[in-house]
Amino acid sequence: MKIITLDRIFAGLVILLGIHVVTTSIGLGLYRGHVPGPGFFPMASGVLILVLAIALLARSFLRDKAITSDVIAPATIAVIGVLTVALVVFVFAAPLLGLSIATFILMVITGLLTQEPDRRGRAFYTRLILASAATAAICHVLFGQVIRIPLIYGPLGI
Amino acid sequence: METLTLLGSGIWAAASDPMMLLAILIGALVGLLIGALPGLGPTAGVAIMLPVAVGFEPVVALAMLAGVYYGAMFGGAVTSILLGIPGDAPSVMTVIDGYPMAKQGKAGQALGMSVYASFVGGLVGLVGLTLMAQIFSRYALMFGPVEMTALMILSLSLVTVLGTNDRLKSFISLGLGLWIGTIGLDQIMGGPRFTYGSSILLEGIDFSLIAVGMFGLGQMFLALEEGPASRVDMASYSYRSMMPRWIDFIKCRAALFTGSIIGFVVGVLPGAGATAATMMAYATAKKMSKEPEKFGTGAIEGVAAPEAANNSASYGNMVTLFTLGIPGSATMAVMMAGLLMLGLQPGPRLFEQQSEFVWTLFGTFYIGNLLLVFITILLVPILAAAVFVSRGLLFAMVIGVVVYGIYGINLSLDDLLVMAAFGVLGYVTSKLNYPTVPLILGVVIGPMLELGVRRSLITSRGDFSIFLGSSISVFLLVCTVIILVLPLFRRFRHSRALSTEQSA
């Protein structure tokens, strides 16, 4: 995806957000009597966002060439997308598997997704599994025993 | 004298507590590694450690977080000198002379100077912080809600205008931060705002989720596009060659002194940051040198000045946070979040009500600064090798720590979804050159600013002239106007000069 396209999409989204913030702020009430109401401050930030995002979008069509040639590689978008989905799945899987096992799996997936392609190999996979298991175990002891946070335990009791 | 006594007892309290020493050591070690690793800067390091640190006592937690910050300032120089790869932005200037020195077989001398310059800069910054904190906090007690509001407006303007090439995006970033800060219950009237019926949003979005998302996860996403650090020949050095040499100190005394002072002053200014301090210190050292032509080819002053400046700036940065409760940079905003999560409100009252906490914390900084001299020298080989750690292993471990840390804050897995959303936002905004610092400061300072504005207007029954009723607030607001108008005026003059040239 071209950066300029993303820039315009983002500016458009910010404009929509600005309109939403301004209209919601009016609904919240800008003033109560003589004093500012709950909508006063959000209104100020909404107007700031809206006006400047419109100016930005206009600028990008008129003369902004600074970032036009850059692109985001589809592979990067894919990795970010899969990592985000993995985090979402983790949220639902952790209560079933337990925090430490779910974290271990998430770490392995993260490692596999983010590793440089030319540095993958048997040695990396072994190190990744060992590092993930060790990190999950250390975090389990640190947070569960030292800081004493009630962790989520799975069917294996960890 | 009183300051010295308080500081002395603070250092003693820190030095006699093994838990505190361990926290300093862990923070400094993590900071050194973060500083050496390209891709993760000090802000990311402090943000990732934040959820872990808040599980401990306040002083221990803050000592650890601060250790990460100033440790990163030490660590960045190692890879800059040995490999020509800056670990973080403030160590970019060190590459210019450090790497040529290493290629000339003077790696040990350059490393030694970077460590001692970091120590000297840190010490000057610490003395500055100790003295200024006392003075600032006394004067800050004169600040009422009106003056504090004016100061917050000035700080936000400074942060938004400085350190960016695109002010339009910087102000949009600030606007987004200010809006995010309004999510949750209205602080005065109690009604929900932008919560969309969700009970989770009633208390607002936890700042740590935003910080870890934008700086931890966002930076991780950004680093995916970077190629692996190419294997370069690491310059050879010996521990003996890193030992201090008087001749180097004498040669670099001016660079060390000016670098430390510039670093501290620039560090105190909200928005300027350590990177700007290193650039100014380098330029000044070059200007003051009798052999400016040697800069860029391996001048030892070119290592001393920026290293002294970035360490001094890291403590200068803390002045406004501790004395006024106003963070001047993203890292300080994350530190402030840590203070707030631990139930401590930074500001002048902190010195009155939590004097022991403040002075013990300052004590840990002195110990950490000294400790880093030894551990940096000892760990040079590990730090240099850290650049080549495989990305997959590093990110997997970061995710593991982040998951436990974020869950541990509110015992909620849903927080991870919020963090992931801010991770994506952090990546997108960074790719599009939206500065993240105004957004973060908008989130942190926004609610305080809103409270200040509305309380002041409630007192004056809606009369805005209340902000012009005090000479301090008038001065601060005039400064704000100048800061906002000056770039526009300069641009106008520049474009007029251009059009005059073209017509001629």
Image: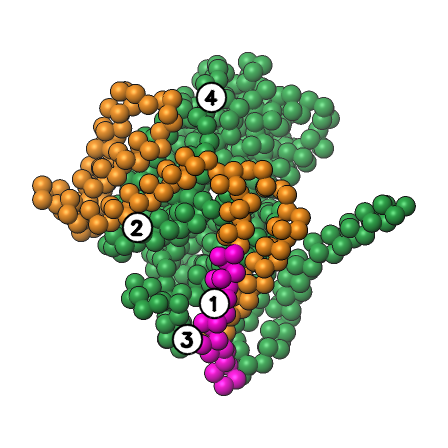
Q: CA distance from mark 3 to mark 1?
A: 19 Å
Q: Which residue is mark 1?
A: A21
Q: CA distance from mark 4 to mark 2?
A: 34 Å
Q: CA distance from mark 4 to mark 1?
A: 47 Å
- CB contact under 8 Å: marks 4 and 1: no
Name which residue type carries label 3: Ile
Q: Which residue is mark 3?
A: B188
| Residues rendered magenta in the picture | A12-36
Q: Report the disc number at residue B230.
A: 4
Residue at the image point whose x is 27% and y is 54% from the top: B414
Q: CA distance from mark 3 to mark 4?
A: 56 Å
Q: Magenta stretch containing residue A69, yes or no?
A: no
- CB contact under 8 Å: marks 4 and 2: no
Name which residue type carries label 2: Leu
Q: Secondary structure at mark 3?
A: loop
Q: Residue furthest left?
A: A156
Marks 3, 2: nearer the viewer: 2
User: Does mark 1 fall on the same chain as mark 3?
Assistant: no
Name which residue type carries label 1: Val
Choose between B386 and B380: the one closer to the eye.
B386
Instruction: Where is residue B249? Give x, y as percent.
Output: 59, 26
User: Does mark 4 fall on the same chain as mark 3?
Assistant: yes
Choose between B328 and B160: the one closer to the eye.
B160
Question: What type of secondary structure mainly makes up the magenta span?
Answer: helix
* Among the two numbered marks 4 and 2 on one chain, the one whose residue lies closer to the N terminus: 4
Name which residue type carries label 4: Ser
Q: CA distance from mark 1 to mark 2?
A: 25 Å
Q: Which residue is mark 2?
A: B416
